[in-house]
Image (cartoon, coloured by chain):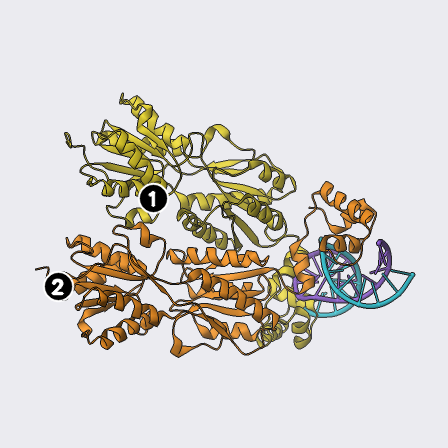
Chain colours: A orange, B yellow, C cyan, D purple
Amino acid sequence: MSTLVEVGRLAGVTPATVSNVLRGRGRVSDATRERVLAAVQQLGYRPNLNARALVEGRPHTIALIVSSIANPFYPEFALAVEKAVRKRDYFLLVCNTNNDPAQEAAYLDAVGGSLAQGVLVMNADFVRVEELLALRRRGVPVVLCMWEKPDEAPELPYIGVDFHQAGVIAAEHLLKLGHTRIGAVVGSEPTGNHIWRYRGFCDALARAGVPHPPEEVRFGGDTIDAGRNAAHGLLAAVPDLSAIFVSNDLPAIGVLQAAADLGLEVPSDLSVIGITDIQLAHQVRPALTTVAVPSEEAAELAVQLMMEVIEDGNNAVPRHAMTSVPQLVVRDSTARVRRSRN
Amino acid sequence: MSTLVEVGRLAGVTPATVSNVLRGRGRVSDATRERVLAAVQQLGYRPNLNARALVEGRPHTIALIVSSIANPFYPEFALAVEKAVRKRDYFLLVCNTNNDPAQEAAYLDAVGGSLAQGVLVMNADFVRVEELLALRRRGVPVVLCMWEKPDEAPELPYIGVDFHQAGVIAAEHLLKLGHTRIGAVVGSEPTGNHIWRYRGFCDALARAGVPHPPEEVRFGGDTIDAGRNAAHGLLAAVPDLSAIFVSNDLPAIGVLQAAADLGLEVPSDLSVIGITDIQLAHQVRPALTTVAVPSEEAAELAVQLMMEVIEDGNNAVPRHAMTSVPQLVVRDSTARVRRSRN
DNA sequence: ATGAAAGCGCTAACAA
DNA sequence: TTGTTAGCGCTTTCAT
């Protein structure tokens, strides 16, 4: 690992000149530039990014805090974030908290303000906004990716996604197919993250005059297994459902499995629709109809917002941005309702 | 962002003492320690990890280079690596090269030696060992995770996995079920990464005296789509296969889909077996029988090896370690052969 | 038990 | 056009 000084010595100049050559700042004669470049080449010199970060007061690194890589959506999103970050010549530090608050705290402590210049936080039920506010107060730029509760807007910059509308879109697709007995499987607690998706669904049903009694919804976790279990319970209690709205793709896939377990054909016996459009959605059979969330766009917007916050010194009023509206993606898990399946 | 100096000023001591308190080095009186800790608390002080890295000559960060997050195995592996790294109090910098050599080079340049103390490289067909050797020559510790070509051992530290044996195990499972017409779908080119898996398969068949003519194998990409296409071609050419060996889970899932496309029941009409045991393997229907690769162990070993390389100053003879042997995981995609399906 | 001083590798004034 | 100087925040001898 050679240093600027060594390069300078070899080229017969001072480190400052080498720095100027490398950064393209200041005026340097062509002859000097070439000698310097040759020396860099010869020594295989690479700048020490730590030293640079130290003197510049900030590293060219952004951290992304995700709660779990087990949920396949997060890697997909992380990839999108990484692209957006690289585009701006930053590096991405991926911090997996593994759903462990202690882990999360440890990361925030360590990463905020020194290892990374700012922290992007993926939404999740357990995000403790308090901690993030404290981090922000310490001067660390924080941006929430994909906030989905319009009624609880946090005092932090965030990217909003209209999940209420996603719920509406899903419900309207089912209604348009003639379904009137539609159950719901929600991948969070009733007060949890997915509540607005469910509200959108309920609102659309109400608007259409289609009843949706409380026994036709199940709340649970955001996993395939939870979705399968919920669907088993739901279908046992209300066997004549012709369609199930699911608040996320992962539990929707669980619902697909439950249908298979029960010998129900999807979509002829039962239609299933999810939200998000993760890769798995078109890899399972039958391929899942879903409402695609613009996650690439959300990633790009989040990074863009982060850059703005950084520019503005992190003191400006917290701002936010909305992604474009989610889009229906029709695949093979939904179909026109049949007269009756008994 | 407060500094050591500020903490010291508040506590009425010099930065050196604060450092001693925080790092638990040197002797400090209890009274002083408490005052310092109180000041730290009051200011919300967090050490600047860049400065620390600079003075210590190396950051507490390890980089992981992966080629693509599109392949779901990589995030799973990245998670395991992250755990192993965190256990040793390091941070993980995830670098996704997106299968782009330029990206990879950019990462290696930037990360090696300053942003990260060492570089873990996930295996892939395109890993250009030359670049990595150059990096190592520049003094950057490099460890290859999961090397699978025993005949082309690189001049770099690596973790080996016996994929030949994985192929053997898969083949023997099929043979034990009575299959004698077994096709193969390989998720790489004939000279590519998966070749030893296929050799293992072939060796086991040969040993059992079961013929495997060249027209019963298809080579292709390591994706679901490639697997499906390969299976379509294979089953069109050789319709009376009763089982297909696939060199990886992702294309194996594609084979499952091809079977569904053709109206073949798995496993009654056709048995399918993969290798790796990614999460998807038990999420698809029918759940995939596969040979599980000890990837958590590989991650742990890779990080451990990295630590050793770091300790030994990166100059010692490249060493390597092998994971334990892959294990058969029987699920629902394999069954005893039927007499005949026509 | 604590302080003083030097320096990690780099950048950014300012001088020459 | 190039060199000099100072300093980013921290750790680490070596004194006291």
Residue at disc 2, secondary structure: loop
Q: Examine the rendered structure and indicate whether residue A165 appears above or below residue A115.
A: below
**Residue B63 at x, y percent in the picture:** 54, 50
Q: Is residue A193 visible?
A: no
Q: Which residue is mark 1?
A: B277
| Numbered tag placed on residue B222 in the rendering | none
Q: Of the residues shown, which amino acid type is indicated by label 2? A: Pro
Q: Nearer the viewer, mark 2 or mark 1?
A: 2
**Residue B174 at x, y percent in the picture:** 25, 32
Q: Examine the rendered structure and indicate whether residue B230 appears above or below residue B116.
A: above
Q: How many marks?
A: 2
Residue at disc 1, secondary structure: loop
Label 2, label 1: how far apart the Cα atoms are: 35 Å
Q: Examine the rendered structure and indicate whether residue B94 appears above or below residue A113.
A: above
Marks 2 and 1 belong to one chain:
no
Is residue D2 found left or right of B106 in the rendered image?
A: right
Q: Of the residues shown, which amino acid type is indicated by label 1? A: Asp
Specify the quadrant that holds the C terminus of chain A: bottom left
Kindly identify the residue that appears in the image at 78 percent across and 59 percent down.
A26
Q: Which residue is mark 2?
A: A239
**Residue A108 at x, y percent in the picture:** 51, 66
